[in-house]
Amino acid sequence: MSTELLASLAGIKMMHVPYRGNDQAATAVMAGEVDVLIDTILLAAQTAKSNRVRPLAITGKTRSPLLPDVPTFAEAGLPEFDASIFFGILAPAGVPRDILSRLERELAEVIKTPEVRARLSDAGGIAMVGEPGEAFSKMLREELIKWKRIARDSNVTLN
């Protein structure tokens, strides 16, 4: 889907070549069988160490500590491109507001600890922002709209 977003924003055509997993796709790029792969930062950093591929851009809004010399897509000239991976914590719809507020406060404190920041940074995590529930809900809705549009415009179907 990230490659479809890239093709859409760049106004280019790309052919999807399916692989069973990231390892096979990375091997195909290193062998010159395919021209491009958008992968998770952890796997991309490992593949880049082979010196058989050249990382071109980071899909998020900020550079990664794992590949600090690699620009973001915005820095590389495509500011609209954002295919950030994010994680969120969700609760059932009926949870009282005071409990949600406490969870938000506690999680924000945990994210600030040096141990958690170091652990997430080692795993490729960058901007750890504890978004309040409403802001996170808004971001999720916007992401859903974006990816639905890309799937529709690219004729992506499930088999």
Image: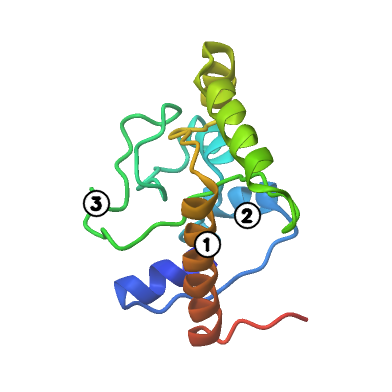
Measured from the top left, where is residue 45 in percent x and y? Answer: 51, 34
Which residue type does callout 2 highlight? Answer: Ala
On the rendered structure, is 9 left or right of 48? Answer: left
Q: Point out the residue furthest to the top here.
A: 114
Name the quadrant of the C terminus: bottom right
Q: Earlier in the sequence, mark 3 or mark 2?
A: 2
- The reply to whether discs 3 and 2 touch (Cβ–Cβ < 8 Å) is no
Is residue 127 in sight in this rendering? yes
Measured from the top left, where is residue 72 in percent x and y? Answer: 32, 46
Residue at (53%, 29%) from the top-left corner? 108
Q: Secondary structure at mark 1?
A: loop
Disc 1 target residue: 34
Residue at (50%, 54%) from the top-left corner? 134
Measured from the top left, where is residue 98 in percent x and y? Answer: 64, 40
Mark 1 vs mark 3, CA separation in Å:
21 Å
Disc 2: CA contacts within 10 A as few (<14), some (14-19) or many (>=20)? many
Residue at (51%, 83%) from the top-left corner? 154
Q: Of 134 and 74, which appears nearest the observer?
A: 134
- Say which of marks 1 and 2 sits in front: 2
- The reply to whether discs 1 and 2 touch (Cβ–Cβ < 8 Å) is yes
Q: Earlier in the sequence, mark 1 or mark 2?
A: 2
Measured from the top left, where is residue 136 in percent x and y? Answer: 51, 52
On the rendered structure, is 119 left or right of 71? Answer: right
Which residue type does callout 1 highlight? Answer: Val
Which residue type does callout 3 highlight? Answer: Ala
Disc 1: CA contacts within 10 A as few (<14), some (14-19) or many (>=20)? some
Disc 2 target residue: 25
Disc 3 target residue: 76
Mark 1 vs mark 2, CA separation in Å:
8 Å
